[in-house]
Amino acid sequence: MNIQDAYNEWSTIYDSNINRTRDLDAEVTRRTLKGRHFSSILEIGCGTGKNTEFLAEIGDAVLAFDFSEKMLAKARQKVTASHVRFAWADITQPWNCESDSIDLIACNLVLEHIEDLDHIFTQAERTLRSGGWFLINELHPFKQYGGTKARFERGENIIEVDVFIHHISEFIHAAEKNGLKLLKLDEVWHEDDAGKPPRLISFVFGK
Ligand SMILES: C[S@@+](CC[C@H](N)C(=O)[O-])C[C@H]1O[C@@H](n2cnc3c(N)ncnc32)[C@H](O)[C@@H]1O
């Protein structure tokens, strides 16, 4: 299903349905960024604001982009702090954000929906300040090789969202090509995943 239509529909149950990947991402994000503070944060693909709430605690200013109006509407209800601004944006287009202005970019469970990783890394490098971090948490490609993809239930049907597979080397190469350095790489299992491939891959790149 078309990505934007899918998330507009999924928005009503995104926070409440069983979703181990969503929950694991929330845990890993908090663990990775714990104890740090950033003056300016950009979140790309914020969805219903699951991580925006936490980013608001560790940032002086948070700008959060998404292209699903209905996911954004949920996020706006959830996070009302005055230093957080939500904006409609399609991140496959140039980001409406000043160059060298951001200390942390957070991108959680979004890049499986983006075909051109190079564009994302180009925009990240442009908008990050020197010393800034680019955090990416994604469904691990090993799960994708086995057929796992973003999906939700509509009545008795399972609706699958359009996705692209990005191998681990693609992230590393796109970062290198755009002058970002790999600072941290983790592979993470949910407690129910024993004996299975890792569920999440987590990168921190630095400028
Ligand atoms: C699986 S949700 C993740 C939401 C949130 N980051 C989280 O971790 O809960 C993916 C989000 O990416 C957004 N998204 C996908 N493609 C996008 C694009 N091209 N531009 C902006 N947002 C996009 C979707 O609308 C959706 O809200």
Image: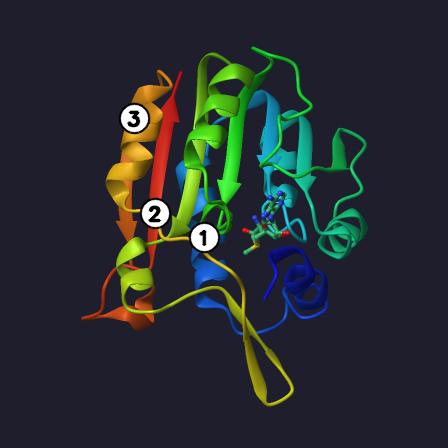
- The location of residue 59, given as percent across then percent down, is 62, 27
- The location of residue 130, given as percent across then percent down, is 45, 9
Name the residue carrying label 2: 166
Amino acid, disc 3: Leu
**What residue lies at 37% left-to-right and 68% top-to-bottom?**
148
Q: Quadrant of the N terminus?
A: bottom right
- Asked whether disc 1 touches disc 2, contact meaning CB atoms under 8 Å apart, the reply is no
Q: Nearer the viewer, residue 68 or 80?
A: 68
**What residue lies at 27% left-to-right and 49% top-to-bottom?**
187
Upstream in sequence: badge 3 or badge 1: 1
Q: Is mark 1 within 8 Å of ligand 1?
A: yes
Name the residue carrying label 3: 183
Q: Is residue 173 left or right of residue 77?
A: left
Upstream in sequence: badge 1 or badge 2: 1
Q: Nearer the viewer, residue 55 or 120?
A: 120
Q: Nearer the viewer, mark 1 or mark 2?
A: 2
Amino acid, disc 1: Asp
